[in-house]
Amino acid sequence: MARQPWSHAYAQWLLLDWGRRTGHEVWVAKGDRNRRVGAVRLGDVCLERIPTALPERVRLIMEQVDVIWFLLGRANPSALFEVEHSTSVVTGLLRMSDLLTTVAPPVEGWKLTVVAPARRLSRFQTELTRPTFQAIGLGRLCRFMSYDELAEQHRDAVRRR
């Protein structure tokens, strides 16, 4: 697909395609399934439902996460991504926090990432100093990925294939 202007949906499409190219089954948020990038409807390139055996309250939160990767044949996610294109980075951090505080015991091995323009890195770092995020160690568990990094990771996945 040709390079698109950055948008929430374009970042999601790159994450979905990158995940599929690296051997993952992928999920896109329920509310974004009908978004299109070019001729591609995001819901057409991902799972119909989240393949997790986690409790329903956890699954309901997960259904709102922008993009989730699952290793083939596995029920638990390996990576969760929140794209913050026009919303505050705190929105993505809150969703990650909701997941971490709802899953008991916490699931190990999940990679949590907020994806946003590079200029928002300092806001991401500042938000992680909130006592509520510090109390659950979100700063140790969640990382920031700029759009440039996402584009580079996607390019590398395309080249390897």
Image (spheres, rainbow, N blue to C red):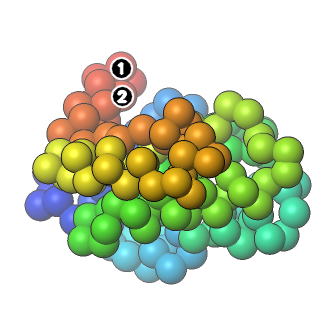
- Which residue is rendered at x = 54% and y = 46% of the image? 134
Quadrant of residue 8 in the image? bottom left
Q: Which residue is denoted by mark 1 in the rendering?
A: 160
Q: Which residue is denoted by mark 2 in the rendering?
A: 157
Question: Would residue 25 be found to the left or right of residue 45 on screen?
Answer: right
Residue 148 in the image: state x and y as whole percent.
18, 39
Question: Would residue 45 be found to the left or right of residue 87 on screen?
Answer: right
Could one spot residue 38 in this view of the protein? no
Q: Amino acid at mark 1?
A: Arg
Crowd tier of the residue under label 1, counting other residues whose Cα lies within 10 Å: few below 14, some 14–19, many 20 or above: few
Question: Would residue 66 be found to the left or right of residue 14 on screen?
Answer: right
Q: Secondary structure at mark 1?
A: helix
- Which residue is rendered at x = 42% and y = 38% of the image? 143
The circle drawn on residue 33 is: none
CB-based contact (under 8 Å), mark 1 and mark 2: yes
Quadrant of residue 41 in the image? bottom left
Residue 29 in the image: state x and y as whole percent.
53, 68
Crowd tier of the residue under label 2, counting other residues whose Cα lies within 10 Å: few below 14, some 14–19, many 20 or above: some
How far apart are the alpha carbons under marks 1 and 2?
5 Å
Q: Nearer the viewer, residue 124 or 149?
A: 124
- Which residue is rendered at x = 37% and y = 55% of the image? 127
Q: Amino acid at mark 2?
A: Ala
Give the residue at the far top of this rendering: 160
Give the residue at the far front of this rendering: 131
Residue 123 in the image: state x and y as whole percent.
26, 53
